[in-house]
Amino acid sequence: MRKIMKFGGTSMGSGEAMSRTADIIMSYDCQRAAVVSAMSGVTNSLLEMMGDNGKEVPEYLNWLRRKHLDAARDNVSPELMPDYLEQLEHQLSGLGHLIHLYRQDEDRIMYQDALASWGERLSSLTLSFILRTRGADSLALTSEEVGIVAAGPPGNGGAVLPATESNLRRTLTPLLNQGKVPIITGYYGVDGRGRPLTFGRGGSDYSAAVVGHGVDADVVEIWTDVNGFMSADPRVVKEARTIAEMDYGEAAELAYFGAKVLHPRTIEPAKRKGVAVLVKNTFNPSGQGTRIHGLDRHSQDLLRSVALKTGLSIVKIYSSELVYQPELVARILEAISADGTTIYAVSTSLSTLAVVVPSEGVQEACARLKGFRDQVEAVKIKEDAALICAVGDGMLESCGVSAKIFAAVADVGANVELISEGASDIALNFMVGGSKAADVVRRLHELYIGA
Ligand code: ASP
Ligand code: MG
């Protein structure tokens, strides 16, 4: 049995949390490595240091030093402490140097991801010393050291799986075979020029799956602060429950639209190799969690989960040219997403293009459409809309699914504002007005998931 365990920011958030994390790692004796996030709050603080109101460097390094020393204090033995302190100081001075470079240089993008990645270097070091104190043969390794290769735009890279796999076979697999417990930095890989490239916020989940893929793990365990995926947001549906088991495809849909249980890209590397992903709660280790793997039979229930995303707007773009100029659609979408705005759904008709974006960026996104004045007749925005994502592989084998789902929408007097069906076999996504959204979710849950 070979497992990759990932611990998030809350599981690394204090000495107490790290001690609990170390207990969990020590409770197994199979081959194992951990991929870790920064201590909670640290990545945010690093990003703040890149802003205009960033703290003075010595003051900031002091804060980080204190935070990690607090976590180490009761958990690292006096024998190991000098070694830990030396390595911690080494990492802190590396960070100080980088912040200076960042603040002096005009080409800041060059240092941005390296800076953002620093919290993981500090947390992995600390946890590995805690494990050594408990007798494990543990070592901290950076993404550079194990060879996680990344490509893509700054702040939003992806792993290059074949290159990463061949590196990990050389760097990590032998350590696992020797019974060592490597603690690896999550969140980033290294680009073609040897520079850190992060995988987007929450990217450590994805790092763990990339490592699991590379070393052919049996399971990737995502240790977080919730019990797993749920059949609905428990704040909306009282009866919502933890989902024991689901298919890769269902998890990918839910991770994208639903609660932030998992970084949405986590599923893909795991699925490629058939590595199971298990979501577990660090603060409730005996809970069964959610097991995600390739299911060979479909669910009896129509739906597995109903996710809800509020705070969205529907932008309707009217143009009689649309149907004759397909490239116009592409250019409009490009303009809307130019500043990184996420497009959650798109729907087209003969002369209308409807695009769903977060409400917070909608005015700016529409301002970027000014350049299309000659082709676009009107732009209308409907704010306060919510996206409902009904997910279940039970949909694959039943007919009249849409009719059943939209009947539930009508039951609560809501109006379907936009539908994006068919892109996925196991998810039906549609928009309703924000004020009715919770009612729709409750009704769907009651009818097709049950108490
Ligand atoms: N530390 C990074 C973040 O806060 C990555 C992660 O935690 O997954 O986004
Ligand atoms: Mg997370």
Image (cartoon, rainbow, N blue to C red):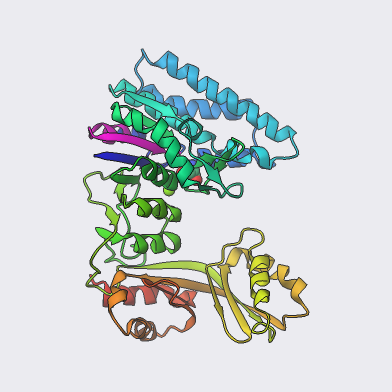
Q: Is 253 drawn above or below residue 6 in the view shown?
A: below
Q: Give percent across and percent down for residue 185.
A: 45, 35
Picture layout, residue 242 above or below residue 84: below
Q: What residue sits 38% from the left and 86% below the top?
A: 410
Classify the position of the C terminus by image quarter.
bottom left
Q: Is residue 32 magenta?
A: yes
What x and y, as percent, mark residue 107? 73, 40
Does the image show residue 88? yes
Whether residue 185 is visible: no
Q: Nearer the viewer, residue 200 or 217?
A: 217
Check the image and report above or below for 237 versus 175.
below
Residue 255 location (% of width, % of height): 41, 59
* Above or below, 190 relative to 276: above
In front of the other: 308 or 102: 102
Q: Quick one: 164 or 136, which is closer to the camera?
A: 164
Total numbered labels: 0
Q: Position of residue 408 (x, y in %)?
A: 34, 82
Horizontal relation, residue 360 to residue 293: left or right: right
Magenta segment boundaries in residue numbering: 21-37
Tell whether 100 sits left or right of 89.
right
Residue at 24% x, 69% y is 299
Position of the N terminus, as image quadrant, is top left
Location of residue 243 by image quarter: bottom left
Q: Is residue 434 left or right of residue 129?
A: right
Residue 441 in magenta stretch: no
Taking the spot 40% from the left edge, 16% from the top edge, the residue there is 81
